[in-house]
Each structure stands twice: as C-alpha cells, then as structure tokens.
Amino acid sequence: MSNSPAGSQATSAHALPSYLNPEHLGPWGIYLQQVDRVTPYLGSLSRWVETLKRPKRALIVDVPIELDNGTMAHFEGYRVQHNTSRGPGKGGVRFHQDVTLSEVMALSAWMSVKNAAVNLPFGGAKGGIRVDPKTLSRGELERLTRRYTSEIGIIIGPSALGLIDPIKNLDVANMVLLLGEIGVILLLFQVGLEMDLGEMAKVGKPALLVALIGVLVPFAAGFGVACAFGESGKISLFIGAALTATSVGITARVLGDLRALALRESRIVLGAAVADDVLGLIILTVVVKVVTEGSISASVVFETIGLALGFLVITGLLAIYVIPKAFTRIDRVAKSSTTIVAVSFALMLAFSLLANQAKLAFIIGAFMAGLAVGRSQQHERIAEGLNPLGHIFIPVFFASIGINADLDAVVARHRHPSSKHQHVGVGRRPKLMQIDP
C-alpha cells in the first residue's frame, strides 16, 4: 500500500486509544516507554507486546451520593481491566482528587506485570475516584464506596474477587464491613432454612409480647436513667431509642451453635427479634422526627408501619404459595444440580434488598428468604451448597463487630463531662452530633 510517512507511522508505532491525548499521556506514557525498553529482550514473547499496550476494558462512571448535609455530590470514577488472561483482574481503588484515567490504566498494567512476575493466577486491574477523601466523613466515604462498586458492577461481574477488590485499598474496616454484611445475610438465611414457617406462626402471640417488653422496658429505662444523670430530653430520647435495638444475627448464631433452633423457646426469641426490628424502626422514626422537627404526623407513622408489615405479609405469602412450587419447576428443568443453589442465593439478596427498601434491616429479608426456601423440597441440597460460603463469610461478621467497637467512645463522656457533643454509635471513628439543649 502507501509508503507515506503517515502509513509508515501507523504500521511501526502502536496505536493509542482515541480517548487519550498523545501530547499528555501521563503515567500511561511512562508505562509504554517501559514496555518499549524491554521489548528487545523478550525474544519470541515480543509478539504479545501490542497486547500489553492496550487495556482490555476501561469504564468511566458517574458516582452520585448524598452528603451528610442533604445535598447531592457527583464524583468521576474509573475501573480498568488491563489483562485477564491469567485470571480475574486484581487491583484496588485509588481515592485522590487528581487521579486520572491515564493513571488508573498504568496502575492496572503494572498490576498485570507484578502478578505475572510472581506467578499469581490473577490479571491486572485498578480503579480510581476523583475525590479528596479527607473532605468526606466516614459515612460519606462508605456511601461513595458502595455506589462506586454498584456502578462498576457491569465490568467486575458477580465474582467474589470482583466484589471485594474495589475497596481493598480504601480502608480495611470498610472491606470487613462489606464482607461482614454478606456473612450476616448468609447467617440469617441459614437460620430461616432451619425454621418452619408454620411453627413460627404458632408462637406469634408470645413472640409479640416478648418484643413489646423488649422494646418498651429498655426505652423507658434508658430515657429515665439519662434524665436522672442530667441529660436533656432530646438526648435522653436518643439514648432510649438506641437501647431498643437487638442483634438478631448474634442471637441466631448462638441458638444455632447450641443446636436449639428447633425449640419452641428459640422460635419465640427469633420471632420477637423480627417484631423488635419493626417496633424499633417505628420508635426511631418517631424520635428522630420529634427531635429534629418538634412533631410528627400520623401519616409518617402509618407509612412506616405499612411498609414494614407489607413486606412481611407479601414475603410470607410468597414463601407459602409461590416459591416452593417455583423451585420445584426450576429444579426440574435445570441442567445443573447447582442451578437451584444459585437461584436461592439470588433470592436471598433480592429479599434483603426489598427489606432495605421497606426500611427494615436487610437481614430480615434474608431470614424471610430462608423461611421460603426452607419449605421447598430442595432445601437440604441448597443448605449443603451454601454452607461453604457461610464458613467463609459468617466469621467475618463477628470479627467486624470487634473491629468497629471503640472503647474510647464508651468513656469519652466521662473524660469530657462538660462537652455538648455526644458520640453516636460504636464505630471506630464515631461521628459527633451537636444537640442543642
């Protein structure tokens, strides 16, 4: 063909991606120079050089989150998979206000080289978000990480490595939190598998009575003790509301380890825990509205109750009339025995998401999914298939509790008795909430 300089350049030099500026390649240009320097020493492997000079996938996403002050903020995010020939793309996420696509591309390429050099079965990948993490609170960083992971789901896929790696280098606590949430979802799903929905219905009245006592007594006691120690009415309300919370995950694990889930008392305790979550949600809604706005309308209360009860009723009906029959049909036409296990896992996540949308704890959704699957003929095979995942993720949930516990927050009030700032929660870096008396 043509012997023009332009044609010669097209055949002798590597073609740059159209989204990069040839005059300002940045870190990606440094990587290309390094590849060019080692090419003469590669021998027969030099035929792969042009592959190394091109990232396999590059994704740019908008990451919108709600800030603590109620406003919306948008951040630019990247995820690059340089090469996945050796296995899943391995690489964390760089949170920096000056990060660029060129930098993320270069970091993903260097990760490919590093993994190959030490013979790890991973490819190279990297992510980035243009944000100064020092300007965001812990809660904002968590929301940013979650939204970013959701946005790049189209490229990382459903694998465990793809789910974990994007936040690996942000903060160890955030990574453990994510794994712990997967663990507690699996835990409540397994508990639901071992429970009988009909037997749960038989202990409805005792469970509701236990839940009422378990909510009203701590709330009244917390409010009264706080007032006795001189706290303002608003702070006392928050303390009382905080004491109404229960840990159904820990309760379920203890009962499971004691092999007592089949006992009537255990069904009452777990039923009360579910009811406690609904009652606690109502109390928290009322307290927050009263403290922040001075009053609350009946419509807000009824909406909260309606969403929670609606979720429980709908999922309960699905568990009785729809899901067992659907699982039988799916298992009949499935070509693999593991298909029904995968469908169960998806159902568990879907119910957890619906519970969260209903403003309930997402683990209540996992528990209801377990009750539904437990009524199917395939429940034993499903339990056997998900047990290995539970052995991996459930211990992380309990580890995350200890990691996020901050003993300094417990004694902070005694160190600074005159401070108006109260620690909220038990996170490692608890937020400070200004409450005017």
Image: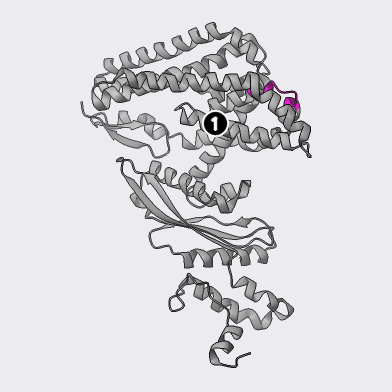
306 displayed left or right of 258: left
Q: Tell me if residue 239 can be seen.
A: no
- Coloring basis for residues: one colour
What is the count of numbered marks? 1
Above-or-below relation of 342 to 17: above
Q: Tell me what residue is drawn at x 36 percent, y 44 percent.
A: 137
The residue range painted magenta reads 372-380
Left or right: 129 with respect to 48? Answer: left
Q: Residue at x 52, y 51 (%)?
A: 152
Tell me the residue at 39%/63% (across/down).
98
According to the image, label 1 marks what residue?
Answer: 352
**Image quarter (top left, top right, bottom left or bottom right) of the C terminus:** top left
Which residue is at the front of the view, 52 or 39? Answer: 52
Left-right relation of 41 to 301: right
Label 1, secondary structure: give it: helix
Is 211 contained in the magenta span?
Answer: no
Instruction: Give the amino acid type for the residue marked by disc 1 in the picture.
Output: Ser
* Rendered view: 87 above or below 202: below
Q: Nearer the viewer, residue 416 or 387?
A: 387
Q: Looking at the picture, how far across and down is residue 361, in whole percent?
A: 49, 27
Measuring from the top left, give residue 315's x and y in whole percent: 57, 23
Residue 375 counted in the magenta span = yes
Figure quadrant of residue 348 = top right
Mark 1 nearby-residue class (10 Å; few <14, some 14–19, many ≥20): many
28 w.r.t. 394: above or below: below
For residue 397, what is the image quadrant?
top right
x and y percent of residue 393 in the render? 62, 37
